């Protein structure tokens, strides 16, 4: 087993670094002594507190000009890594104690650098990015743009499977004059994270500068930056602001705080290669806020003198005030690289990521049904668990990213995908269960009550029971559309947990009464809904929004979930001795019988020989007419019969239809038609690592949720356009793999050879879409149109959202299905009761 735990013990600071430390240690002690004196006099306003301390350590405080700086944005969303510490539950919650402190810090990596880093709740970003600016003879480089980056996991077993979310990133300068090695992980015992740096110069006069762009408390427009001794601090002008502190165990030679694009360190260095416009703070009186940057210059390296390597640990500490932020940073630095990394992995004193993986009884057996020895499977287990909030246990988010973040304004706080959708949530919970983790899906299921609409939902008027479209992890309402699949899936999840003995008869009966019965009742009757902008009447099975949150009407994928949810509810009602279960079953059977009349057409222009097929959605339940879908994402709505969507495969997955149903197979044939023009085409082919062709699928024809094919601009970068195009979503390769497994089973053709071919095509297919950090994206480049500023290669994840929890969950479930030779999301009770 290859576990790199103690490879730091042989590292020594260079003579130059030692000299600089000795020269500056007295000044640092004096500055920090002043800090300590001020720490004992806590202010109610952390911004005022930091300003007071900064003023006390210098007699000439210079505030940076140029407020508020350029407009802030988020970072590139194609993450190659995410991380946080593993924390065990205590009685189904995250409970911090002296023996078991809970660290609430998450980070992401993209383009070779540290990007959005969160503290507190999982959506609460504090940092946009941190990288090095490197100057030398004739060049001024930014690490993000001027290096070639590679990434690997610090902890791997003999099969190359990651054992923790700790990373080694190596960035090699394009000009060949330096290399930067960085290790990233969080401190499980504190609200801080560590970045170990080994900076090597291959020429004389190479100077590294650490450059950080804070976005405190989820916005980049209200920040203040300050230099305090050997600490870089950032906070906002709000009284309850979080505070971020950056420190290292090698002293910087000088530092500056400024506004991005006007007086920040990058602008200063780009001028003449020198950091010579030094500012102590961006606001000495806390009135000047904006998009700020912190820049710290480190010793110049000279290869000829044998002083070409700088090694140091950089720590980012967070806190609700300056004192706790500084304390966290100092404590992590004092603990040192080896101890913090060992705790992160897990050792005799700490429960860490390797212990979580060891708790998953199914994962090793599942690994034999992959084509990469389980590397992506292990990664997926880690990634899914990392995307859970630690204040609100069980709150599973969609992605630790902001879609197309580097073109999205950060002037106002935005959760992006760092939020709860019950549909994505269901996928993740089922993946945990597939791995053999019974604790996380149970806690997650119990969390769902927080996002169910009731008479206690603030400002809500109408029928209760449905689940909110999108919320923050604390339940704060963000989007308020009604999506009937998101109301059915909690029922489905509860039934699965009961069947798996995760919930006892008594527990599921109580949950049926408290949460699932109101949801089932809403699926039957619908009713009046009035919340925020949403003032409507819901009449199931017509949904206000289907699973892509864009269209109203009769949706095959939504109705598949509604039927499965109602039949699961009928089974639970029988256990609870509730006579309403007969009504649930009767409605489910009626819906199944009406599928073809409300969602199947045989006279559209795509129909071949008048063979019936499923439309994406029928606005009015009349699929044989020319009703147009709504305009969306810049695209004009088209005739419902021209739009194909693989959502009908959910009918097979849940047990509503058999895989060899003739309408299902007709619809599959149309989905596979690669002769359709690109706007309506769904299927594309990609090349796997073994050279074989594997399939990828778009959400549906005429999808505009993606980059502009003419200009190459990101989605809605300058407003929606008709040339935007949604790309291939890798989890559809998994959905198709599930269908093909079900088809082979239903036709009794699942031979060992066919089984292996399914693995080679669909499991390997999903593995093909993983990036170098084994993160699976929301969307992958399909080769159509302008390859954008990033010059995407075929199959490469785009800047939409990576990692997407749903994609990782679908991969886990596909591998479990191939292991069991049975579809993991199948509901036998649905198939059985629809037959009788």
Image (cartoon, rainbow, N blue to C red):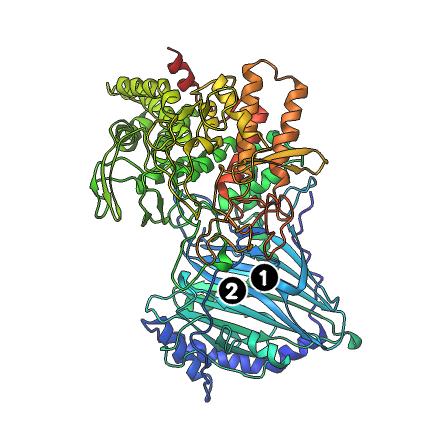
Could you tell me if residue 320 is visible in this image? yes
785 vs 412, nearest the viewer: 785
- Quadrant in which the N terminus is drawn: top right
Q: Dot 1: few (<14), some (14–19), or many (≥20) neighbours within 10 Å? A: many
- Which residue appears at 61% of the width and 17% of the height? 750
Q: Quadrant of residue 312?
A: bottom right
In this rendering, the answer to whether 606 lies above or below 331 is: above
- Quadrant in which the C terminus is drawn: top left
Q: Quadrant of residue 814?
A: top right
Identify the disc placed on residue 78. Answer: none
Q: Secondary structure at mark 1?
A: strand
**Mark 2 highlights which residue?**
316
- Which residue appears at 69% of the width and 56% of the height? 7
Q: Secondary structure at mark 2?
A: strand
- Measure the alpha-carbon separation of dots 1 and 2: 8 Å
Which label's residue is closer to the chain start, 1 or 2?
1
Q: Quadrant of residue 300?
A: bottom right
Q: Position of residue 612 (x, y in %)?
A: 46, 21
Q: Dot 2: few (<14), some (14–19), or many (≥20) neighbours within 10 Å? A: many
116 lies left or right of 239? right
Q: Position of residue 307 (x, y in %)?
A: 74, 74
116 vs 722, nearest the viewer: 722
Tag 1 near tag 2, CB within 8 Å: yes
Q: Position of residue 25 (x, y in %)?
A: 58, 79
In this rendering, the answer to whether 770 lies above or below 292 is: above
Q: Position of residue 835 (x, y in %)?
A: 40, 12
Q: How many marks?
A: 2
In this rendering, the answer to whether 741 lies above or below 694 is: above
**Mark 1 highlights which residue?**
195
Could you tell me if residue 360 is visible in this image? no
């Amino acid at each position: 087993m290859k576990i790199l735990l103690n490879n730091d013990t042989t590292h020594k600071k260079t003579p130059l670094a030692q000299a600089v430390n000795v020269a500056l240690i007295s000044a640092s002690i004096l500055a920090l002594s002043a800090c300590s004196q001020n720490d004992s006099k806590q202010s109610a306003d952390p911004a005022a507190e930091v300003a007071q301390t900064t003023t006390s350590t210098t007699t000439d405080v210079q505030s940076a000009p140029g407020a508020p700086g350029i407009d802030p944005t988020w970072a590139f969303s194609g993450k190659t890594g995410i991380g946080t510490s593993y924390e065990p539950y205590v009685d189904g919650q995250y409970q911090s104690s002296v023996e078991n402190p809970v660290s609430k810090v998450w980070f992401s990596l993209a383009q070779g650098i540290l990007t959005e880093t969160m503290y507190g709740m999982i959506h609460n970003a504090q940092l946009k990015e941190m990288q090095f600016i490197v100057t030398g003879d004739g060049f001024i480089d930014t690490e993000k743009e001027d290096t070639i980056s590679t990434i690997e996991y610090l902890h791997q077993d003999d099969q190359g499977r990651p054992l923790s979310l700790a990373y080694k990133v190596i960035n090699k300068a394009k000009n060949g004059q330096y290399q930067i090695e960085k290790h990233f992980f969080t401190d499980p015992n504190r609200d801080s994270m560590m970045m170990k740096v080994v900076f090597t110069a291959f020429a004389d006069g190479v100077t590294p500068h650490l450059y950080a762009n804070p976005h405190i408390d989820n916005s980049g427009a209200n920040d203040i930056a300050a230099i305090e001794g050997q600490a870089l601090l950032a906070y906002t002008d709000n009284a309850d602001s979080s505070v971020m502190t950056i420190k290292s165990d090698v002293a910087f030679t000088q530092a500056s705080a400024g506004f991005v694009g006007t007086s920040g360190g990058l602008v200063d260095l780009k001028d003449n290669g020198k950091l010579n416009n030094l500012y102590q703070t961006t606001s000495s009186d806390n009135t000047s806020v904006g998009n700020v940057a912190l820049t710290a210059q480190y010793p110049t390296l000279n290869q000829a003198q044998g002083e070409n390597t700088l090694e140091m640990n950089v720590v980012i500490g967070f806190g609700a005030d300056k004192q706790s932020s500084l304390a966290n940073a100092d404590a992590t630095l004092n603990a040192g690289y080896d101890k913090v990394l060992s705790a992160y992995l897990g050792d005799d004193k700490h429960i860490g990521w390797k212990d979580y993986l060891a708790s998953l009884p199914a994962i090793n057996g599942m690994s034999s049904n992959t084509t990469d020895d389980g590397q992506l499977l292990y990664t997926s287990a880690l990634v899914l668990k990392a995307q859970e909030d630690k204040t609100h246990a069980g709150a599973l988010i969609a992605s630790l990213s902001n879609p197309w973040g580097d073109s999205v304004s950060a002037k106002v706080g935005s959760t992006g995908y760092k939020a709860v959708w019950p549909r994505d949530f269901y996928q993740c919970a089922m993946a945990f269960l597939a791995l053999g983790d019974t604790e996380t899906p149970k806690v997650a299921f119990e969390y769902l009550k927080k996002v169910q609409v009731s008479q206690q939902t603030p400002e809500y008027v109408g029928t209760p029971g449905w689940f909110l479209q999108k919320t923050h992890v604390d339940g704060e309402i963000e989007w308020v559309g009604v999506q009937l699949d998101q109301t059915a899936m909690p029922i489905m999840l509860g039934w699965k947990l009961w069947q798996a003995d995760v919930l006892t008869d008594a527990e599921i009966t109580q949950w049926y009464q408290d949460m699932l019965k109101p949801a089932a009742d809403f699926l039957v009757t619908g009713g009046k809904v009035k919340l925020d902008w949403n003032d409507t009447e819901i009449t199931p099975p017509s949904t206000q929004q289907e699973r892509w949150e864009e269209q109203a009407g009769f949706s095959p994928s939504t109705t598949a979930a509604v039927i499965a949810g109602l039949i699961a509810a009928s089974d639970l009602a029988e256990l609870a001795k509730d006579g309403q279960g007969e009504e649930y079953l009767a409605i489910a059977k009626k819906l199944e019988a009406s599928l073809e009349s409300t969602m199947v057409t045989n006279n559209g222009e795509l129909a071949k020989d008048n063979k019936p097929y499923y439309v994406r959605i029928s606005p009015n339940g009349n699929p044989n007419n020319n009703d147009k879908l709504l305009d969306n994402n810049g695209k004009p709505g088209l005739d419902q019969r021209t739009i194909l969507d693989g959502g009908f495969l959910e009918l097979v997955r849940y047990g509503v239809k058999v895989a060899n149903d003739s309408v299902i197979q007709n619809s599959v044939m149309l989905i596979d038609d690669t002769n359709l023009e690109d706007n309506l085409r769904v299927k594309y082919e990609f090349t796997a690592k073994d050279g074989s062709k594997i399939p990828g699928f778009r959400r549906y024809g005429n999808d505009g949720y993606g980059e502009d094919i003419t200009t190459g601009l990101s989605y809605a970068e300058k407003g929606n356009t008709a040339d935007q195009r949604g790309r291939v979503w890798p989890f559809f390769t998994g959905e198709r793999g599930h269908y093909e497994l079900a088809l082979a089973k239903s036709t009794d053709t699942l031979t060992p050879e066919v089984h292996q071919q399914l693995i080679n095509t669909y499991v390997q297919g999903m593995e093909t879409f993983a990036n170098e950090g084994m993160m699976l994206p929301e969307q992958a480049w399909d080769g159509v149109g302008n390859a954008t500023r990033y010059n995407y290669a075929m199959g490469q994840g785009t800047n939409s959202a990576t990692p997407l929890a749903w994609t990782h969950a679908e991969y886990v479930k596909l591998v479990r299905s191939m292991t069991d030779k049975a579809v993991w999301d199948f509901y036998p009770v649905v198939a059985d009761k629809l037959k009788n």
